[in-house]
Image (cartoon, coloured by chain):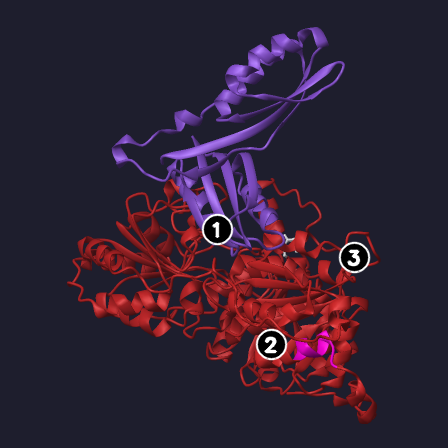
Chain colours: A purple, B red
């Protein structure tokens, strides 16, 4: 099962290495990881998307993360009401003639063209991973030259619904 | 205990020394003194020269033990920590000095031993350029330390040293590395210094949750076949008195792990002995048959559990551990109790527990104990190693600190040197690192100078760190080094005999040094014993001798350790239970 886990960490040297090294050593499968600073100086936030086999593995994962000295807080926000976004840059093969066609294709995704050259376009799109995957699928026939994705970053929504109505992970599945 | 003042140069030029400005290294020495460090194990080199210079100028701040290999230093620090409960301190230089520590750091991590390790590093202006003797100590040690630091600013040194000692010695203990670039130890620090703890993510839970204690008692009261497993967590928490009260109050049978030896008196009628691969039949069958298992401070290592399918298949499991990540990691646990073992036992002792209905179970276990004791046979091919360990026990009244190396002799020592006292057992459990036993004895003797230290080694493992013999002479440490000499890597040989159809690939030594002459070359007494009839006299003689001895006992060469749970098998499927 796929889980979204956020970590609040003390921003000390090596913290990313400690976390990813532990995940690798204990054979947890990381799908994506994003890291950035927060509103508090010295505190960073990591968002992990991981694939775990069962609840026992998931419990081990959160315990092992919590055990890291630099990790202040671990939250499994998978079942919570969250906003989760990823950003992708997609360089797609294109001729000037195709420009408009592609523009029309990406508009419903609220994606932007950031760079244009004689034989390519670079497109930026943000959203949930399934939206990004859908756009990539549409662009694929034109020939994708390069893709770079940030991985998911996520926050809890300001208001949490009653536990019976929480969103499930399928929202984020790809 | 302190000898050979001669080898440390006298501080003749006191005036010149005073003039030297205070450096980061001087600050470090003061910080170690502030932590009540009395002994440091180490080895100098380029990147730590400023630290050794400060040590020279501040002579007497603590004793520095110069081993002959960094691995000897860190194993000695572990031995010191394991018998004193204090944090062991190690210093090594950058590059090769640091990499020589890796086995010891891993060992301390696996066995939860508090160490603070200082490694020199190239100046931070050249870090990352593959400078001479640069190695990525932070990168290398991240997976094998509880935490590690590289000092970037000398003003952080007070905070880092304080945090390191705190992290190493609290919660689940473990090794902490502090990597110090040379320019930091040479720096002339000016304030303001940072000396406040800054560890918002580190708050070990020590007090048990009362609801979990209640659940634990409810489950215990319902049990017909209760069993308690005790591990080194009980020793780290200094909870042996509380454990004994708790056990005796409800008459609970006890199994100890390899490293839990001494947590509960081995000769107590409620002790079933050690569990696991070479544990007793009674202990293993009790783990198999019990209907309630309380684990206190053990981590359900695979050498204890055997094949998990056959481990406590019918038991409700409760687990007291200060490290929540150990609970439920290997064995499904219904009642987790995150706490220090002493706090948890105190909480249990405060509660009434109804008398249990487990007389039949106790009778059954006693029956097993009588029917299937540990056994061995004496032959005329050499000294029986198990009998020899029993003899050592007899001649030391079971009161020695015993350090072991890794292999058959380790298992025989664990099986036949019954320990009633805590903190007297020093062995490499989780990592099983050969070469550990002898340097660990040096550290143990330095830490507990008034106690008898017996180091039981195989001829293989002893040769991994025998260079440290010089320290016995130099520091006049009366360690009794026992070699159970089978001219082989006995444990490897045993597995080849049993699981590889007697193909003894590279496990038999065609040659060995003359251990008596070897000892003598270090100025130490050496004896060789090859007949059982000489054992009593020799033991009497060397144990009353006031000084170090190396005793080479020629044991039955192909004796095996039994009983045994074969790899992959369940604890209920032991080999060699009976003659
Ligand atoms: C550093 C290291 N290398 C290899 C091993 C694998 N190993 C485990 S026991 C053993 C044999 C030990 O032989 P010896 O020290 O003579 O002790 P004995 O088993 O004969 O009592 C070996 C090689 C190990 N545990 N540690």
- Residue wearing tag 1: B303
Question: x, y percentage for residue A67?
Answer: 47, 53
Is disc 1 placed on a helix, strand or loop? helix
Gap in Å between the C-alphas at discs 3 and 1? 37 Å
Ligand 1 within 8 Å of disc 1? The answer is no
**Badge 1, how many Cα within 10 Å: few under 14, some, many 20+?**
some
Does the magenta run of residues contain A123?
A: no
- Residue wearing tag 3: B134
On screen, residue A112 above or below A76 = above
Question: If you read the primary sequence from the N terminus, does the residue marked by circle 1 or circle 2 appear first?
Answer: 1
What range is drawn magenta here?
A: B22-29
Question: If you read the primary sequence from the N terminus, does the residue marked by circle 2 or circle 3 appear first?
Answer: 3
On screen, residue A55 above or below A114 = below
Marked residue chain, label 2: B
Foreground mark, 2 or 3, reads: 3
**Badge 3, how many Cα within 10 Å: few under 14, some, many 20+?**
many
Gap in Å between the C-alphas at discs 1 and 2? 36 Å
């Amino acid at each position: 099962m796929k889980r979204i886990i956020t970590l609040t960490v003390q921003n000390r040297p090596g913290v990313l290495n400690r976390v990813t090294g532990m995940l690798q050593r204990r054979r947890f499968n990381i799908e994506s990881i994003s890291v950035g600073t927060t509103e508090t100086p010295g505190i960073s936030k990591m968002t992990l998307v991981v694939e775990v086999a069962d609840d026992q593995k998931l419990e081990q994962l959160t315990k092992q993360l919590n055990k890291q000295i630099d990790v202040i807080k671990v939250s499994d926000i998978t079942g919570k009401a969250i906003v989760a976004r990823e950003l992708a840059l997609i360089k797609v093969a294109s001729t000037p003639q195709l420009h408009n066609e592609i523009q029309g294709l990406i508009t419903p995704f609220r994606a932007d063209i950031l760079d244009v050259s004689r034989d390519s376009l670079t497109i930026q799109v943000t959203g949930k991973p399934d939206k990004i995957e859908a756009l990539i699928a549409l662009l694929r026939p034109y020939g994708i030259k390069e893709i770079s994705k940030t991985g998911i970053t996520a926050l809890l929504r300001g208001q949490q619904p009653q536990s019976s109505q929480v969103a499930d992970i399928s929202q984020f599945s790809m | 205990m302190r000898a050979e003042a001669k080898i440390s140069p006298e501080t003749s030029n006191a005036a010149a020394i005073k003039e030297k400005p205070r450096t980061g290294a001087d600050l470090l020495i003061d910080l170690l003194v502030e932590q009540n460090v009395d002994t440091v194990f180490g080895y100098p080199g380029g990147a730590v020269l400023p630290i050794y210079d400060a040590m020279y100028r501040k002579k007497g701040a603590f004793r520095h033990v110069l081993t002959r290999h960094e691995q000897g230093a860190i194993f000695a620090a572990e031995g010191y920590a394991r018998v004193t409960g204090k944090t062991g301190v190690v210093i090594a230089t950058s590059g090769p000095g640091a990499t020589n520590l890796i086995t010891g750091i891993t060992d301390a991590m696996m066995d939860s031993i508090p160490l603070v390790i200082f490694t020199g590093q190239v100046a931070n202006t050249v870090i990352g350029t593959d400078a001479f003797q640069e190695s990525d100590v932070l990168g290398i040690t991240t997976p094998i330390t509880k935490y590690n630091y590289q000092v970037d600013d000398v003003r952080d040194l007070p905070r880092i040293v304080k945090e390191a000692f705190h992290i190493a010695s609290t919660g689940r203990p473990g090794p902490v590395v502090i990597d110090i670039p040379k320019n930091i130890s040479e720096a002339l620090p000016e304030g303001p210094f940072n000396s406040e703890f800054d560890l918002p993510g580190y708050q070990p839970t020590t007090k048990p949750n009362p609801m979990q204690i209640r659940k634990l008692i409810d489950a215990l009261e319902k049990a017909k076949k209760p069993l308690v497993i005790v591990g080194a967590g009980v020793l780290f928490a200094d909870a042996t008195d509380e454990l004994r009260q708790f056990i005796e109050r409800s008459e609970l049978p006890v199994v100890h792990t390899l490293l839990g030896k001494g947590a509960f008196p081995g000769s107590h009628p409620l002790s079933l002995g050690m569990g696991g691969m070479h544990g007793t039949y009674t202990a293993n069958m009790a783990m198999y048959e019990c209907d309630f298992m309380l684990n206190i401070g053990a981590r359900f290592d695979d050498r204890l559990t055997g094949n998990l399918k056959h481990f406590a298949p019918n038991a409700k499991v409760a687990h007291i551990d200060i490290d929540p990540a150990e609970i439920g990691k290997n064995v499904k646990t219904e009642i987790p109790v995150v706490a220090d073992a002493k706090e948890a036992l105190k909480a249990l002792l405060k509660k009434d527990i109804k008398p249990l209905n487990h007389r039949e179970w106790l009778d059954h276990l006693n029956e097993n104990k009588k029917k299937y004791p540990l056994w061995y046979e004496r032959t005329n091919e050499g000294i029986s190693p198990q009998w020899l360990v029993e003899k050592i026990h007899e001649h030391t009244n079971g009161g020695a600190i015993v350090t072991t190396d890794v292999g058959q002799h380790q298992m025989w020592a664990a099986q036949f040197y019954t320990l009633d006292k805590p903190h007297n057992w020093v062995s490499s459990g989780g990592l099983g690192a050969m070469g550990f036993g002898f340097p660990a004895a040096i550290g143990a003797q330095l830490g507990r100078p008034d106690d008898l230290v017996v180091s039981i080694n195989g001829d293989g493992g002893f040769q991994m760190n025998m260079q440290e013999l010089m320290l016995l002479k130099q520091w006049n440490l009366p360690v009794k080094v026992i070699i159970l000499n089978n001219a082989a890597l006995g444990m490897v040989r045993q597995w080849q005999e049993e699981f590889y159809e007697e193909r003894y690939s590279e496990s038999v030594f065609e040659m060995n040094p003359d251990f008596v002459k070897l000892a003598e070359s270090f100025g130490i007494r050496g004896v060789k014993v090859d007949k059982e009839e000489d054992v009593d006299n020799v033991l009497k003689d060397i144990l009353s001798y006031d000084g170090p001895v190396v005793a080479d006992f020629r044991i039955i060469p192909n004796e095996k350790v039994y009983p045994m749970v074969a790899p992959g098998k369940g604890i209920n499927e032991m080999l060699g239970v009976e003659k």
